[in-house]
Amino acid sequence: MTVQQSTPMARLRARMITDIPARNLGPASQTSHLRACKRFAAWLGRSPETAAPDDVRDFQRHLMESGTSICTRNQTMTGVKFLFRVTLRRHDLAAEVFSLKEPVKVPLVLSGNEVTRILVMAPSLKARVMPSLAYGCGLRAGEVVRLKVDDIDGAQNIIHIVQSKGRKDRNVMLPAGILGLLRDWWKERPAGQDPGVPGPDRVIVPGYRGKHLSARQFSRLFKQAARAAGITKPVTLHSICVSQA
């Protein structure tokens, strides 16, 4: 019988996986931090445990010179800094990490008429319900796709948002028109994933393999509706949220 020996990188990864939830960070942070450290280790060519301050400075220079966006560069270095500060207890290396400021841009805003056109020209009821929730209720894309039956309070016209950004719960108003749209969608909604799932836990917009639709899939549906409405601006889901505000 062959016994597989754990490598230094495997042990380091296991330690990080333990450290991340212990600091009350969510699954997205775990994925991002592990990806960042894998990238750093690949560039370094050896275990990050052996890194020196010059290695950290050179890696940051490499990210900038290779054309990595400021957002991705900062996200990568946040994960690397977590590795140094928390997992390795190498505060000397963590001190070498710095963040870059992103240029402040004026957000693209849609007019009320443009939003109406997008909702009217949506190619399907699903493609209309989701941006209606984002625009009419002020929900983020991730909040829309994670909505479950139990989150909708039709009696009080309220949507309960559970553990969203900042791990906070909040309530938002549910306009009567959108509640009616949700009821129409429920009649058309595919129920193939429902067997075995308690009614309150059923997602409003199901995706594949028992999961909710992803924010990326939601974005594609929104852009399809925008094209159908003749919107030529480079719109994103953030555009409709900003327009609502």
Image: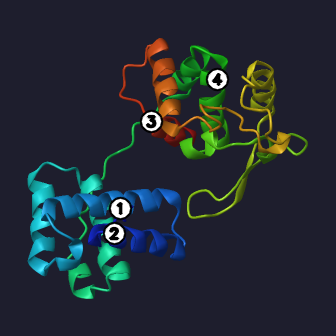
- The dot on residue 2 is 1
Among the 4 quarters of the image, the one containing residue 46: bottom left
104 or 228, nearer to the observer: 228
Q: Residue at x 50, y 29 (%)?
A: 111
**Mark 1: which amino acid?**
Thr
Alpha carbon distance from label 4 to label 1: 52 Å
Q: CA distance from mark 3 to mark 4?
A: 23 Å
Name the residue beneath numbered marker 2. Answer: 6
Q: In this picture, is 128 found above or below 51?
A: above
From the image, tell me which residue sits under label 4: 126
Whichever of callouts 4 and 1 sits on the residue coming sooner in the sequence is: 1
Q: Quadrant of residue 13?
A: bottom left
Q: How far across and down, in percent of the image, does residue 11 sit?
A: 35, 72
Residue type at tag 4: Lys
- Between 209 and 134, the one lying in front of the other is 209
Q: What is the distance, in whole Å, between disc 1 and disc 2 at their CAs?
A: 13 Å
